[in-house]
Image: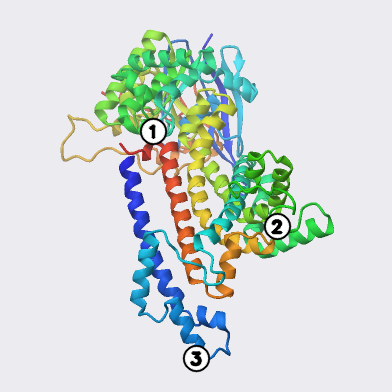
Amino acid sequence: MPLLDVRDLSVVFQRRGTRPVAAVDGVSFTVEPGQTVGLVGESGCGKSVTSLAIMGLLPRRGNTVTGEVRFEDTDLLKLRPAELRDRRGRDIGMIFQDPLSSLNPVIPLGLQVAEVLERHQGRTRREALREARGLLDAVGIPDPSRRLKEFPHQLSGGMRQRALIAIALACKPRLLIADEPTTALDVTIQAQILTLLKELVDNSGTALVMITHDLGVVAGLCDTVNVLYAGKVVERAGRHHLFAAPRHPYTDGLLQSVPRLDADRGGRLHQIRGSVSDNIPWSEGCAFAPRCDRVIDDCIGETVPLLGGALRCTNPVPKGVRV
Amino acid sequence: MVRVISRRLIQLVATVVALMTLVFFWLRSLPGGPVDALLGERATPQTRELLTRALGYDQPIWVQYGRFLKNVVTGNFGNSIRTGEPVTEVIGRAFPATIELAIAAIIIAIGLGIPLGYLAAKHRGRLLDNATIIVTLVGISIPIFFLGYLLKDWLTQDIHLFPPSGRISTGLGNTDVTGFFVLDGLLTRELDASADALWHLVLPAFTLATIPLAIIIRITRASVLDVLDEDYIRTADAKGLRHATVRKRHVLRNALLPVVTTIGLQTGALLAGAVLTEKVYNWGGLGTLITDSISGGRDYPVLQALILLAAIVFIVVNLAVDLSYAFIDPRVRVK
């Protein structure tokens, strides 16, 4: 049985006087225990909203969440807010994009780690702080005793993200959701953080949902990858498969957009034309059609199904074309 | 920390000297003066000259100014022109009355303002929030003297709920220890006097509190809404912390920063408001003293000392606010 089973998840935002917008439009995917699953796509494709919906962290007003988020036997969407609070941080941990703004500026780091242990493991403050020191040590923060008393602004960006990882993993959750955890960091620090995440996840058997727009991150970390476009999964494949033989023109475009060292120095970098906002509603065909190089007449008309549960395309890239 | 405080104290002295100079010349540039006020229009030139000389106003203005500065430094503010009493005594009598009133007002403003502002933010866009916005708008807009007379008329005349004026009923609280009547009652164990003084305090304090209260509600509401949108609140929720913990530990403390600044700035408004409030409720504090000193005889020594005192209170409160900042927000702590 999968650890996390997201079925037909939709999130519709509506503000008074505006047209409802489906940020997430019937997304389904599963995460097996200990597995690392990637959610990949451009800004605005719905990947962060998906993660917030799973955690129940979307603002209470202005949106409608439908579908199912099964965590083991429970549909998280059906839980009362207080029940969900019992599970967040204990069963599912989450780390965020911007480590500075994600830590409270006026609370010492130690308490920010310790409070999650106090909450879910019934530790006293003293026990929790002692454990927090160990956790900071485990994520590679030097001199943890001193850091416990310090505030987020006194830490470097990399250390802050390490601290957030320590917080998210404090209660040994079975699932960790990482929402672009390296986007705000230097490239060298990015690699360190990814290595750390991989290590921790492998050692503890925690499943990981990795949300990113960075295909490099996916290549290094994920077992399975879900490519999202305009709120829907357009392609799903194992990592090797996806990189070796992408079938959806969007995935193909993303992969070709990665700059290559062996390319002509004077040559233009590859880009996918248009932007995410240049799409048509899924109900009228393929949302990617206006930007697609392989668009044919059949792409317009009706919703393209997710063929074989893995590919949403009428005219996919033929197998074995790419080198 | 010591360096910051000492630097601020030096700034305080500089500000006070500048202000005193301004006030000194400003008072004397106004038409009329103590001599006219004391002797009236039909005084003979001889008496006028005698009094002018007696008061020392025949000297060149810079000599007067030099003497004034010397007096201020030695803590001698001279005698009241109107009553002949030492200025320090006149002010010493009125000061506790105003401070008692101002403290009561600020307690009301903070004690009601922060919870109400928080509730409004929590119920954003709903009935409670909209009601709060309207009520605070009214609170800011109604002039103190109007609201004061309105409340007085209604709550002391139509229904005899509160005493109409004064700080304490006659015959009570005869022992003067600190000049703060509520405190005096407690110190001398005359609890009935304490309760009576407190009862007298309710209406004036509430009247004086309305504007700071409305502003604190508004600022708290806006600030809480800002903080609720912060990433670290999402992190706190992602930890599964209880709602109450998130609220107390993560929201309120961050939201209080702008509120604390506002409280400091509002002390100025409070001092100004005290003048009007004291007039309405016949309170007999600094506000009453300042109006009497202007209208009844251009009492230069009293006025100068009063303005100096108001400036020092304002500066000290704001210094305290800045220091409390360091206490609340580690980012402004100086190493």
Of A64 and B28, the residue lying toward us: B28
What chain is tagged by disc 3? B
Query: Where is residue A134 shown, x and y percent of the image?
Result: 37, 13
Compared with residue B130, is residue B66 higher up or lower down, i.e. above or below? below
Label 2–label 1 contact, CB within 8 A: no
In whole angstroms, how far apart are the C-alphas of marks 2 and 1?
Answer: 59 Å
Query: Residue at the location (59% across, 74% down)?
Result: B296
Quadrant where the C terminus of chain B is found in the figure = top left
Label 2–label 3 contact, CB within 8 A: no
Query: Can you identify the residue that label 1 sits on?
Result: A98
Report the mark closest to the observer, 2 or 3.
3
In whole angstroms, how far apart are the C-alphas of marks 2 and 3?
Answer: 42 Å
Amino acid type at circle 2 is Gly
| Residue A222: quadrant of the picture | top left
- Using the rendered image of the protein, determine whether residue B157 is visible from the camera's viewpoint: yes
Compared with residue B126, is residue B62 higher up or lower down, i.e. above or below? below
Report the mark closest to the observer, 2 or 1.
2
Query: Residue at the location (35% across, 80% down)?
Result: B60
Of B200 and A124, the residue lying toward us: B200
Q: Residue furthest left?
A: A265
N-terminal of the pair, mark 2 or mark 3, is: 3
Q: Residues within 10 Å of mark 1 (few under 14, many from 20)?
A: many
- Using the rendered image of the protein, determine whether residue A208 is visible from the camera's viewpoint: no
On the picture, is A156 further left or further right than B138? left
Amino acid type at circle 1 is Asp
Query: Where is residue B213 shown, x and y percent of the image?
Result: 61, 51
Q: Which mark is residue B45?
A: 3
Quadrant where the N terminus of chain B is found in the figure = top left
Query: Where is residue B309 shown, x and y percent of the image?
Result: 47, 58
Query: Can you identify the residue that label 2 sits on?
Result: B166
Amino acid type at circle 3 is Pro
